[in-house]
Amino acid sequence: MKITAITIFPDYFAPLQLSLIGKASQGGVIELRILNLRDFTTDSHHTVDDTPYGGGAGMVMKPEVWGDAIDSVLAEAVGIADLVILTPAGKKFTQAIATQFSKAEHLIFACGRYEGIDSRVTTFYQNQKNLRVHEVSIGDYVLNGGEVAALAITEAVVRLIPGVIGNPDSLVEESHNQAGVVEYPAFTKPPEWRGLKVPEILTSGNHGAIANWRAEQAEIRSQNANREQE
Ligand code: ADE
């Protein structure tokens, strides 16, 4: 899978060299490219933003610069690309969307800053062939830009690509595989820590009883997790 991120802060993406995503990149499972948006400016100040039409606070990212940057990526693209525009106004990112993106040929992240990217960029690319456009938010809070959102999405997506996680079984019983359902609590050695004992049933050797207990615990945790979101 190709992953291209367009940003004014390429350094934000350094963590993708680490851990499993770093290995996937070094091993060729993903082909990662980070483009500096300012390389697509044409003025001596490398301006990427301007004041909003209609007035108001903040700055809006200029469509010409974004258009030139995205066009340069699409010029090299083969097949269908998925353009992911990060914005708190987008569709909420979920495990289901991560699964959908994990089958993409080429994910292109457009990391906006300030008050976002001129809205015509989304409209224009929605009408282009060989491209799907997604406006995506990672949650109901406002970040300073899309970079951290792109990192989170990349990690959630790349770990689902076959071969990235050593033991694919760990992807089977995982939180959020079903919407609203989270995993049972986990315990390891020692059997007692700071006065807290591991639930006896887990050391009983009774696999049926353990499975039932875990299902019950997952249900309780799921109810709590969903309640906390309200
Ligand atoms: N940019 C700023 N806030 C964001 C959010 N919550 N999700 C995605 N992109 C963003």
Image (cartoon, grey):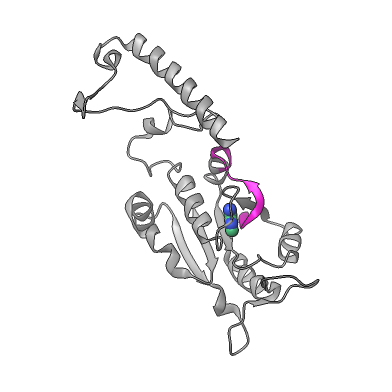
| Residue at far bottom of view | 44
| Residue at far front of view | 195
Q: Quadrant of residue 145?
A: bottom right
Regarding residue 164, the answer to whether it shows in the image is yes
Q: Position of residue 213 (x, y in %)?
A: 39, 14
Residue drawn 60% across the image and 35% down it: 230
Q: Quadrant of residue 6?
A: bottom right
Q: Nearer the viewer, residue 43 or 3?
A: 43
Ligand 1 visible in quadrant: bottom right
| Residue at far right of view | 54
Q: Position of residue 178 (x, y in %)?
A: 54, 28
Q: Nearer the viewer, residue 180 or 154?
A: 180
Horizontally, residue 19 falls left or right of residue 221, namely: left
Horizontally, residue 212 falls left or right of residue 55, namely: left
- Is residue 174 located in the magenta-colored stretch of the structure? no
Residue drawn 54% across the image and 34% down it: 228
Q: Is residue 212 above or below residue 196?
A: above
Horizontally, residue 216 falls left or right of residue 178, namely: left
- Is residue 90 located in the magenta-colored stretch of the structure? yes
In terms of secondary structure, what is the magenta stretch mainly? strand
Q: Position of residue 20 (x, y in %)?
A: 35, 49
Q: Quadrant of residue 211?
A: top left
Residue drawn 32% across the image and 39% down it: 166
How many numbered tags mark residues here?
A: 0
Q: Nearer the viewer, residue 120 or 187?
A: 187
Q: Position of residue 188 (x, y in %)?
A: 25, 28
Residue range corresponding to the magenta coloring: 80-97
Regarding residue 179, the answer to whether it shows in the image is no
Q: Nearer the viewer, residue 141 or 101?
A: 141
